[in-house]
Amino acid sequence: MTTILDEIVATKREEIARAKAAVPEAALREKLTGAPPPRDFLAALRNPAGEAEPGTPPCAVRLIAEVKRASPSRGLIREDFRPVDIALAYQRHGASCISVLTDEPYFQGSLGILRRVRAAVALPVLRKDFVVDPYQVLEARAAGADAVLLIAECLDDAELKALHDAVCELGMTPLVELHEAANLPRVLAAGARLVGINNRDLGTFHTDLEHTLRLRGRVPADRVLVSESGIRTRADVARLAAAGIDAMLVGESLMAQPDVGAAVDALLGAA
């Protein structure tokens, strides 16, 4: 049975073919010299408050706050979408890193949005997309990304390792994500130091926060672990902290709030 993930990946491969025809790889590589130096995404998640404003209290679980206008499961999340203002609010209120959705057909994102956000904030920025080709890694660095999401469910062993290494070679951090527990050994074998557990099944879009907690004990202690999706309340964060989760990637529950800064404060337990 074809899932929405299968559909997205098929669309992505067509998109990549068009991008390569428009800007050949050699031309894209030339753009790398104009990209800003990478910021250390992994180190930011090991520091309680990242680059937060002075006086912002640290949170035991570091926040990767996401800039996302829409999603396949929810449709349009935020009509008043001002990505730079949103990212700056995230930074002011204690996020450690920023994630930017760059997929256009399903999430209404773009590399242009990432470029604008990266130029405006002091925090490391993640390209969140369905990355299946080394060309997309080059795109990410040329746009200023400091980290790139890799999804185990989209990649075979050779692709996962090759993309992981390509991200590292350009000075960025791979955030290697899985949902299916069977993919965890593959993720670790690829060399991932930053491991994401997606609580949302990308085949059905069912979300279960317990998924991270069930898999926590199987992730080596020397890896930085990120819980993704389904994190909405301070109580959710407290459960992650109690389980020793290092970081969380939160998008929809923040983007849906009128005041994203106040939403971050509530999530992180700020006054």
Image: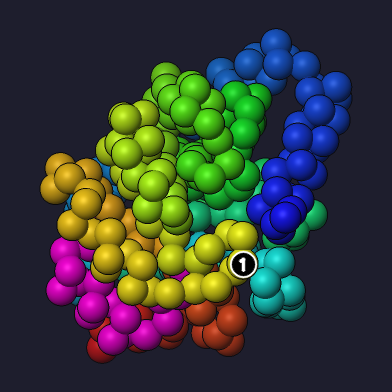
Residue under the point 16% across and 64% down: 244
Residue positioned 32% across, 30% down in the render? 189
Residue nearest the viewer, comparing 207 with 252? 207
Pick the residue in front: 270 or 233.
Answer: 233
Q: Is residue 64 above or below residue 168?
A: below
Eyeballing the image, is 164 above or below 212?
above
Pointer 1 local density, CA inside 10 Å: few below 14, some 14–19, many at least 20: few
Quadrant hosting residue 42: top left
Q: Residue furthest front?
A: 1
Image x and y of residue 124, in percent: 41, 47
Image-quadrant location for residue 64:
bottom left
Is 164 on the left or on the right of 131, as rendered? left
Q: Is residue 31 magenta?
A: no
Residue farthest toward the top in the current orientation of the protein: 26
Q: What residue would you read off at disc 1?
A: 204
So how many labels did they put on this image? 1
Q: Residue placed at 53% from the left, 45% from the top? A: 153
Residue 189 visible within the image: yes
The x, y position of residue 162, in whole percent, is: 48, 21
Give x and y (percent) for residue 172: 42, 32
Q: Is residue 111 left or right of residue 269?
A: right
Identify the amino acid type marked 1: Thr
Residue 208 point in image, percent of width and height:
43, 74
Residue at figure coordinates x 62%, y 34% from the top left: 132
Q: Is residue 267 left or right of residue 250?
A: left
Q: Quadrant of the C terminus?
A: bottom left
Tag 1 secondary structure:
loop
Image quadrant containing the N terminus:
bottom right
Give the quarter of the image for residue 85: bottom right
In magenta, the rendered stretch is: 229-249
Q: Is residue 253 left or right of residue 51?
A: right
